[in-house]
Amino acid sequence: MTDRPAVLIMQPHLAPLSPFLESAYAVYRFWEHPPLEAAHDIRALVVAGEAPLDKALIERLPNLDLIACFTAGYDGIDLDWCRQRGLPVTHAPGVNHEDVADHALGLILSARRQIVSGDRDVRSGAWTAERRTITASLGGQTVGIVGLGAIGKAVAARALAFRMKVVWWGPRPKSVDWPRADSLLDLARASDILVVACRADETNRGLISREILDALGPDGLLVNVSRGQVVDEDALIAALKAGTLGQAALDVFVEEPTDPARWADVPNLVLTPHTAGATTAGVQGMLMLLMQNLQAHFAGEPLTTPVP
Amino acid sequence: MTDRPAVLIMQPHLAPLSPFLESAYAVYRFWEHPPLEAAHDIRALVVAGEAPLDKALIERLPNLDLIACFTAGYDGIDLDWCRQRGLPVTHAPGVNHEDVADHALGLILSARRQIVSGDRDVRSGAWTAERRTITASLGGQTVGIVGLGAIGKAVAARALAFRMKVVWWGPRPKSVDWPRADSLLDLARASDILVVACRADETNRGLISREILDALGPDGLLVNVSRGQVVDEDALIAALKAGTLGQAALDVFVEEPTDPARWADVPNLVLTPHTAGATTAGVQGMLMLLMQNLQAHFAGEPLTTPVP
């Protein structure tokens, strides 16, 4: 055993956490093939919550006693399985929901006001004296929000500033100012723009199905800032190609990074590389909670933000 | 003379107005080379307000007695010259300022949250497992608004919903909630994001000079939804290339359509083809005012929305 507790960072895109973690811990990086003897030292995994947990690996780490998600989401983590092993899980709630909501509005504006395609048109010379692009006004459009948690509420507040109407749906009624649709299908029917902002888990995989996309319709816009798995991606691609859905703007994908070839011939689409919550302020907040949770755990104190 | 008053549409991108105008008027289109004898019939010009007025042409139209701008802006029109000739000018105020403000926020989000470049990255395969883009949070950034008219106020209202701070500058104090900077230079120094939303005329050509861009600085973002001529475009290009200005997002250009070659090697830039005010609702509002002004003029009634 080393003097300092050892932690193992699982995903390469979390590599920038290394210098911060090295101030207090021995740090291994999974993709660098840590030495076999490290298996006995490792006390905590540092993971991206959306990545599926490597259970076979965990069973080879006899002294592991914490799963620390860097992110707010933890949909890659089988919580029951962890509980059975007495493995606590921490995450980073409440630090980036405002940034995610900002990005959702950015996706709405980019799609509806044709900013991404407009940029392409100016650069390619498609803007000519004869051709003037007319886009849809946001004012008066109805935004339907799937899941009225912290992100959903922040999206609603912004939508009002753009003179849009807000409706929402989620499994449980909430005491808020905006009307709740009777069902997700009713929400899609009532909406010009559907924003997926719910927490993802095994119960809502494929929730945004072909039926929901059909109800949103040929003028509708689907925005996803939740997780890729919540949307039936194959149905979405088919709907955009057939024109039964008007537009989509996606920050998240079933597989990440997503394969560009999958989207090459799909029209009316804005794509961002899972950046909605990845802001300077958001990352600082997540880093702070990660360090606090690790510190509390190794000091035997209550965890700062355990997964409930 | 024909039975119905004759109008001449000047710019090709206004061609879609033809069927509406033809319901009441004989319509000529400048780019179709109207017959010589039409010169005596033409009573009104229908123009895009940003296009320079063709004075030589006007002097060859003896019965012309109205310049009807389809747009809100009329910066291409030499008002003194028109006044000397007793030529009234109408325009379309107050119909698309909310849409222009929406677009300004879309440009801010597209630039700051890297939506346009993110879309490019996903499609090119630049998004890899090792590379995660971190963008700047909007929360806490200061938006400086140049010109607090209808558009500027609408930008301010939206910026607050994104937790941004608002400062503004304009030549005249106004009684509003947001602080006015002592000068444009002070505004640029205080701002993370500078939004140009003023009316353009000969007095403010090149207002956003190299000095202003330097004050906005290497982390600053310039957004222009006013007119291209208000920004010193050569200084802007030089500042972006040198990195003395962080980013720019432009809907308007000194020459429109702008030459794509001018922007090909300029970094950190979002470009849209003058679409900020060109929305379905905005265009309908502008069309209604155009028809009302023409109708009033030919009936000898007071003009609905003359340029003041």
Image (spheres, coloured by chain):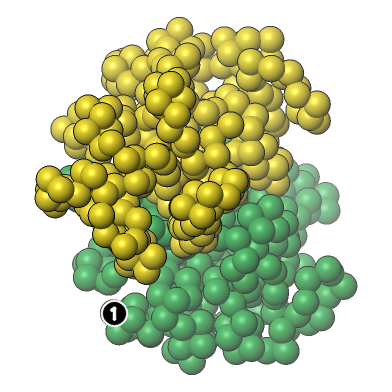
Chain colours: A yellow, B green
Q: From where the camera sits, is residue A79 visible?
A: no
Is residue A161 shown left or right of residue B193?
A: right
**Residue marked by disc 1:** B241
Measuring from the top left, give residue A48's x and y in whole percent: 36, 42
Q: Residue furthest right?
A: B175
* Above/below status of B274 relative to A147: below
Residue at image coords 28%, 79%: B241
Residue at image coords 87%, 72%: B175
Residue at image coords 68%, 52%: B161
Which image quarter holds the C terminus of chain A? top right
Looking at the picture, which amino acid does disc 1 mark?
Lys
* Above/below status of A89 relative to A29: above
A304 and A96: which is toward the camera? A304
Number of numbered discs visible in the structure rendering: 1
* Above/below status of A189 relative to B208: above
Q: Residue furthest top?
A: A211
Measuring from the top left, give residue A178's x and y in whole percent: 76, 28
A125 and B125: which is toward the camera? B125
